[in-house]
Structure formats: structure tokens, C-alpha cells
Image (spheres, rainbow, N blue to C red):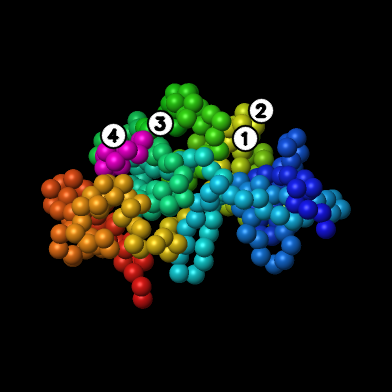
Amino acid sequence: MSKPAELDLGLVVATHGRHCVVENPEGTRLICHTRGKKSDVVVGDRVRWQASGDSGVIEHLEPRRNVLTRQDEWKTKSFAANIDQLLVLVAAEPVFSESQLARALIAAEDAAIPALILLNKADLASIATARARLAPYAAMGVEVIELALKASPIEARARLEPLLADKASLAIGPSGAGKSTLINLLAPHAKAQVGEISSALNSGRHTTTATHWYWLTPQRRSALIDSPGFQEFGMRHIDAQQLASLMPDLRTHTAGCRFYNCTHLHEPGCEVRAALQRGQIDDSRYRIYVEILGELAPR
């Protein structure tokens, strides 16, 4: 068998079960499959593959810089690998789940992936309420970018393009936030690519719910990764003792706790709860911490 370094290098741009679409350095795409019944390959992976008839076989997965993951009681789901930044899209309407937002940011922090919040529908009157709910995130250093993707697409594009330049950006967000509008604005060829991939994989409508990698420029230096929506964002892969350190507003105060293994729930001398009482930590953020910690506590 050939050594990995002797095989062709490719980028995974779409996945569907054991099959995926791999792009070679010249930009040509082909269908590949993994050996065995289970595939751990995700969009954004660099792989080594070799030809097998009209398709290819993935023989080796190159080391990842990072991978964004969510995990519930039953399974682990990886969004994408080798990401430069995460774009969490929310909107003034419908009302977004702050718990889901916080979980996405915690997962990004755990994977050392920088994150931005895109607040869409800034043209609506309800933007003031959404802006207020995001104030704790802006205060702890997360950049919040207000956009009106449908009402002001030219302005939105001008604002986003410099932020996405020369990066692979993963976009996630709830239904109704405007993720499809974002993708179509920045990658107008996206629908055509999805159709081509669906046809090649012979997977029909199921591929439209898969993760896809779209190049934003002919030079293939900037990319947007579109991930399907989700109802829950499990955190079972997070160490309970590390949770507070993954929330910047809590992390600022943990060093002041009397006990090194403080859970920030009931211990005397807890600086996190003291900061909460002083108004230095937002009530909603602390509630989310308690909620997630309860899921991570040993059973």
C-alpha cells in the first residue's frame, strides 16, 4: 500500500454517509468513499486518497487544526474541521435561544475557534430588544455585527467580505435567522453546487441537509461552510470542571474563588457568585452556566 505522503491530497467539501466529495488542489471534484462501515470524515478535512474506477478511496485523514463538535447522550456530531472562524447567525425576529447561542460559543471556545455573532434583520423595530440581549456577549469581547441581509444586501456584503477574506468560516444558526439568505448573498452559485453534488451522490433531497463548503472567490482563498440547522446543542464532550473557563465573563472571576475546584453553585468564598451579586455577570449567563453544568454533572 502507498504511504500517505505518496497519495493525492484533497479537501472534503461535502459529505453524505460513507461518501463524500473531495476537491483536489487544481479544483477538480470527485466522489470518494471511506473504507469500513463508519466514516469520521467531515467537511474541511484534508485527506489522502487514491483513484478506484470512476471514484476514489480515502486512505488517510491528515491531522486537524480543530473540529467543532456537539454531543448529546446518544451521539457525537461534528460540524466541520479546520475552521478559521465561526459565524453564529441570530435575528431580531424570530426570538433566538440564548442558550443555543451560548452553547455554540462554548463549543467554539473549547475548540479554540474564534467566533462572531451576526445579528440579522437590523431594519426591524425589535432590533433594540435583540441588541440588549446580546449586550453581555459584546461586553465580554464577542464581536456582534448587525446586518439587514434582505433589506440592505449590498451594505451587508460590503461589511462581511473583509471579515471573511482568506478564511474558512462556518455559518450556523436557527431556522428563520437568514442563513440561506447569507449563503446566497455571498455564494450565489451555492444552489447549483448543491444540485451537482446531490446528482453525483444520487442522494436527492437528503444532501440539502448536509454540510457544504463554498468558495467565495475564484482564487479559492475564502470559503463559507454551510451547516444544517439543529434543535439541540449537546455539550456532553465538555469537561464539567472546565465549563466556567470556557465562558469568558465567568472565567474573569474564577481565580478569586476560595476553592480551586469550586463549582460556583454553593461553595463559600465563590467569587463568581459574588460577581453575579455585584452585577458583573449577567443573570441569564449564570442561568445558562447552571443549566449546562447540570447536564454535565456525573450521574
User: Badge 4: few (under 14), some or many (20 or more) residues near its Cα, within 10 Å?
Assistant: few
Q: Position of residue 279 (x, y in %)?
A: 15, 46
Q: Position of residue 145 (x, y in %)?
A: 38, 33
* Cβ atoms at labels 3 and 1 below 8 Å apart: no
Which numbered disc, 3 or 1, marks the residue that appears first in the sequence? Answer: 3
User: Which marked residue is nearer to the observer: mark 4 or mark 3?
Assistant: 3
What amino acid is labelled 2 in the image? Pro
Residue corresponding to mark 3? 148
User: Which marked residue is nearer to the observer: mark 3 or mark 1?
Assistant: 1
Q: Is residue 220 visible?
A: yes
Instruction: Give whichever of 215, 24 is nearer the camera.
Output: 24
On residue 73, which mark appears?
none
Q: How many marks?
A: 4
* Cβ atoms at labels 2 and 1 below 8 Å apart: yes
Mark 1 residue element: strand
User: Which marked residue is nearer to the observer: mark 4 or mark 2?
Assistant: 2
Q: Residue at x 70, y 67 (%)?
A: 37
* Cβ atoms at labels 4 and 2 below 8 Å apart: no
On residue 125, which mark appears?
4
In the visual, does 211 lie left or right of 197?
left
Magenta-drawn segment: 133-144
What amino acid is labelled 3 in the image? Ala
